[in-house]
């Protein structure tokens, strides 16, 4: 009998322990469920936080990183972060500088200038050229969103003639501009805006910069109030072909870099003053008299007569008036003005 009681007692104890285990599991399940509900409620509130209106849309996206280049190994300059203070800048035009940059500076336009390196040089450039390509690609894509900002890009290996008399810079050559801006490593991006009687550098970046950071800086630059004569139509003057005699214009090509179609009727080409690099009243030029609609990304040519064929073998899309005897010479600058007379693009002959 004692053995039976002991056996029964042990069985009773085992059942009691088993029942206690069920109760403990139930309590744990209730606690876990409560925590999950609490976390879900917190997450819902955070996901609905509004975006600050003063932010560029891209700044809310994850920062992109260069392909095959870990961010922890990227060499960056001290200017990678947005500048906390504007730095004064004055262009020395007594030294060789790009004519189109000088024109935009004289017009007091908002300016973005970048220097990049695309040549292979692994020994002296350990961070890799993908960094330059990445930033250059970001600037190219973002530039189409800001037609009121003048963008200039230069390969760091192409300075052009410096210190040579009677030698003018060709398109793509930068002269002493990087020295005046204090370019260190590439990629180098400087953003400038007129302020009072001078210019200031609002942002300066050296080394890799994520696209959302560039986007926010451009957004801020475009918001700077300036009194300039820059068109809000995003077209570029790609080529001006002169006549064989008389220094006139045979045809010129225009590309639409914006997001909306552009009608070029009423646009004009004007020769810039060689002393001031600005459009002066009564300056000689031509006027587009054809109804020419240019779609996004499309490039068209306009000729002095309808049967002219451009360098790509395409017949011109329309014609212009005037321009037969402009006495154009190598080095002259020409500006494309929109129908309201604002400068849309410039080019050197």
Image (cartoon, rainbow, N blue to C red):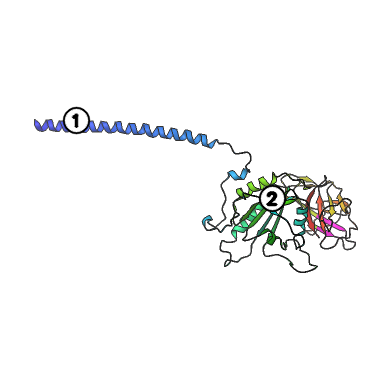
Labelled disc at residue 12: 1
Q: Is 178 left or right of 288, judged from the image as shown? A: left
Bounds of the magenta segment:
240-252
Q: Quadrant of the N terminus?
A: top left
User: Between 180 and 159, which is closer to the camera in this rendering?
Assistant: 180
Q: Residue at 63%, 46% (x, y): give it.
A: 216
Label 1: which secondary element:
helix
> Where in the figure is residue 104, as x and y percent of width and height?
76, 53
How crowded pointer 1 is (Cα within 10 Å; few <14, some 14-19, many 20+) is rated as: few
State how far apart marks 1 and 2 are (Cα): 81 Å
Which of the two residues, 256 or 270, is positioned nearer the viewer here? 270
Question: At which x and y percent is residue 57?
Answer: 62, 43
Q: Position of residue 277 (x, y in %)?
A: 81, 56
Q: Secondary structure at mark 2?
A: helix
Left or right, 331 with respect to 114, comes to right
Q: Position of residue 18 (x, y in %)?
A: 25, 33
Q: Is 292 situated above or below 163?
A: above
Q: Is residue 89 above or below residue 52?
A: below
Residue toward you, 74 or 1: 74
Residue under label 2: 143
Q: Is residue 56 above or below residue 189?
A: above
Task: Kindly check if marks 1 and 2 are in contact, taking CB atoms under 8 A apart as contact.
Answer: no
Residue 28: image quadrant is: top left
């Amino acid at each position: 009998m004692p053995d039976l009681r002991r056996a029964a007692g042990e069985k009773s104890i085992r059942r009691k322990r088993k029942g206690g285990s069920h109760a403990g599991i139930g309590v744990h399940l209730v606690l876990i469920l409560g925590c999950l509900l609490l976390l879900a409620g917190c997450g819902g509130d955070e996901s609905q936080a509004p975006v600050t209106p003063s932010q560029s849309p891209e700044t809310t996206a994850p920062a992109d990183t260069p392909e095959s280049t870990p961010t922890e190994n990227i060499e960056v300059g001290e200017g990678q972060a947005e500048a906390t203070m504007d730095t004064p800048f004055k262009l020395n035009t007594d030294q060789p500088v790009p004519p189109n940059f000088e024109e935009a500076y004289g017009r007091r336009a908002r300016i973005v200038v970048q220097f990049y390196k695309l040549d292979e040089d692994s020994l002296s450039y350990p961070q890799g050229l993908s960094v330059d390509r990445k930033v250059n690609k970001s600037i190219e894509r973002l530039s189409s969103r800001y037609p009121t900002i003048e963008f200039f890009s230069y390969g760091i290996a192409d300075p052009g003639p410096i210190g040579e008399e009677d030698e003018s810079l060709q398109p793509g050559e930068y002269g002493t501009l990087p020295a005046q801006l204090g370019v260190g490593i590439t990629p180098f991006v400087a953003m400038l805006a007129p302020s009072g009687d001078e210019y200031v550098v609002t942002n300066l970046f050296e080394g890799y910069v994520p696209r959302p950071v560039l986007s926010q800086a451009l957004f801020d630059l475009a918001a700077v109030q300036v009194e300039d004569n820059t068109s809000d139509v995003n077209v570029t003057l790609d080529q001006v072909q002169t006549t064989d005699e008389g220094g006139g214009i045979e045809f010129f090509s225009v590309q639409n870099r914006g997001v909306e179609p552009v009608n070029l009727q009423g646009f004009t080409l004007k020769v810039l003053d060689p002393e001031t690099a600005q459009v002066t009243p009564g300056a000689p030029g031509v006027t587009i008299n054809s109804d020419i609609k240019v779609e996004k990304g499309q490039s068209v040519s306009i000729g002095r007569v309808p049967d002219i064929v451009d360098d790509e073998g395409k017949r011109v899309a329309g014609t212009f008036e005037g321009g037969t005897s402009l006495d154009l010479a190598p080095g002259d600058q020409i500006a494309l003005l929109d129908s309201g007379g604002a400068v849309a693009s410039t080019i050197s002959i």
